[in-house]
Amino acid sequence: MEKQYIDVFQDELLIDAPSQLSIHIHKQARGSLFIVVQEDVQISIVMDEQSSSHILFYNKNQDKLKLDIHSNLKKDAECKMGFLDMETDSVSMDLKTVLDEPGAHFELMTGQLGQENTIKHNNIEILHKAGYTQGLMQNFAVLFDKADYQMVANGNIKKGCSQAQSHQVTRVLTLGKDHKAKVIPLLLIDENDVKASHAQTIGQPDEDQLYYLKSRGLSHRQALGLLSIGYLLPVLDLMDNESKKEELRQEMENKVGLYGNRENS
């Protein structure tokens, strides 16, 4: 397995061979990183104190993907991370972020499209090892026929981490038949003086919304696609490159069937 190490921001990074990647973001550094993943990868990220980053992982693997991400955030470091997956093969993601020192702040947003017969399994943990830390997870998925989606979302606050905050939301839109959707929200709290919450929804689209969209000339598939976009599009807010963001938005619209036949179906 190829090993890579970077300690400066790059606008875009391509992982096209099985790799171990170490990323070191130095004290007070600020920037963004767009990582295109085409092969299995193990990634280690260390953010020094008062650093700030936007990191978006984009799955472009044409085969089964295994993604392992481990992050450590130091004092007053802030990271907003995203994972966008619209591919037609299976994904297994393990992601763990450790908030090591006071003031560390981590936000994660995932968007996954479960096409027919795909497996999307995720195991995510934000571990608070210091007080005055904040962790937020927002996970969104759209599932078509026979898709298999699983999200284990764990907010873990250790004893002594007073004033820590852990919040999570998972929303799954089911559009097909014979799918599997399993969401396991966990809050492991060993300290009283904290704020923590979780919320989840799993369900089909609103029939009134579908009726309205189809009355405006959209096909059934297009109407479902438009509702799907609302689940996946927020992940793109992590991108600073507007042209790349527009390119991904158009690809997203195509993947969910927004450009299909406009005849009612």
Image: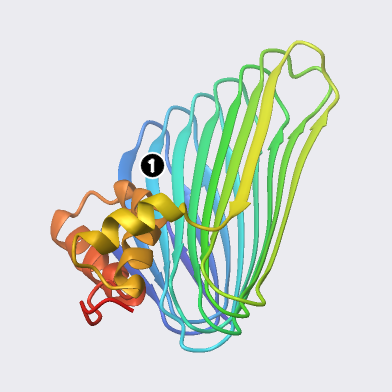
216 lies left or right of 95: left
Can residue 125 be seen here? The reply is yes
Is 20 located above or below residue 110 in the figure? below
Quarter of the view holding residue 226: bottom left
Front position in the image: 188 or 67 = 188
Front position in the image: 20 or 195 = 195
Front position in the image: 230 or 157 = 230
- The structure residue drawn at horizontal position 13% and vertical position 61%, both measured from the top left corner, is 243
Residue at the bottom extreme?
Answer: 63
From the image, which quarter does the C terminus lie in? bottom left
- The structure residue drawn at horizontal position 24% and vertical position 60%, both measured from the top left corner, is 215
Quarter of the view holding residue 250: bottom left
Residue 242, percent across and down? 15, 54
Residue under pointer 1? 53
- The structure residue drawn at horizontal position 35% and vertical position 71%, both measured from the top left corner, is 220
213 lies left or right of 157: left
The three-letter code of the residue at mark 1 reads: Ser
Residue at the left extreme?
Answer: 243
Residue 62, percent across and down? 46, 88
77 lies left or right of 120: left
Question: Helix, strand, or loop for circle 1?
Answer: strand
Is 208 located above or below residue 221 in the figure? above
From the image, which quarter does the N terminus lie in? bottom right
- The structure residue drawn at horizontal position 42% and vertical position 83%, both measured from the top left corner, is 16
Can residue 99 be seen here? The reply is no
Residue 182, percent across and down? 73, 60
